Amino acid sequence: MPKMNLSHFEASFLFALFTSVVLGVVTKRTDRERLRYGLYVFGCFFAALVGIGWLMYFGHG
């Protein structure tokens, strides 16, 4: 089986994507609510990923 070599950013992006899909599916009742909530959660995950990445960059100089 081939080995996947993902960067930290790619792995975090996939985690945010899959987690937002699951949260959208299991927490809302209609398809419209699921889509909106999934996009919202993905946006929050991605914003946190970028924000924490910049904090780490400036923290380590």
Image: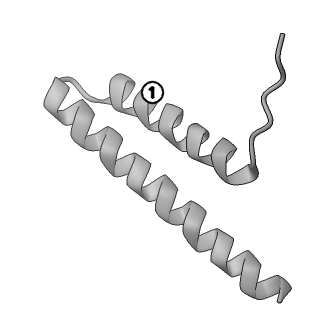
- Identified at 57% across, 67% down, the residue is 50
Question: Percent x, y for residue 31?
Answer: 18, 25
Pick the quarter of the image with the N terminus: top right
Q: Tell me the quarter of the picture where residue 4 sits.
A: top right
Q: Quadrant of the C terminus?
A: bottom right
Coloured how?
Answer: one colour
Q: Residue at x 84, y 23 (%)?
A: 3
Residue 32 spot, x, y in % from top left: 15, 32
Q: Is residue 40 above or below residue 47?
A: above
Q: Which residue is mark 1?
A: 22
Residue 56 lies left or right of residue 16; in this view the side is right
Residue found farthest to the top: 1
Rendered position, 36 above or below 22: below
Residue at 40%, 48% in the rendered image: 41
Residue 37, how many percent across, how many down? 29, 42
The answer to whether 6 appears left or right of 17 in the picture is right
User: Callout 1, which amino acid?
Assistant: Val
Q: Is residue 29 above or below residue 24?
A: above
How many other residues sit within 10 Å of disc 1, few (<14), some (14-19) or many (≥20)? few
Compared across the picture, whether 13 is left or right of 31 comes to right
Q: Secondary structure at mark 1?
A: helix
Q: Quadrant of residue 56?
A: bottom right
Q: What is the x, y in percent for residue 30?
A: 16, 24
Note whether 56 is above or below 19 in the view shown. below
Please identify the quarter of the rendering in which residue 26 is found.
Answer: top left
Image label count: 1
Task: Answer left or right for 54 relative to 25.
Answer: right
Which residue lies at the image location 41% right of the left edge and 30% below the top edge? 21
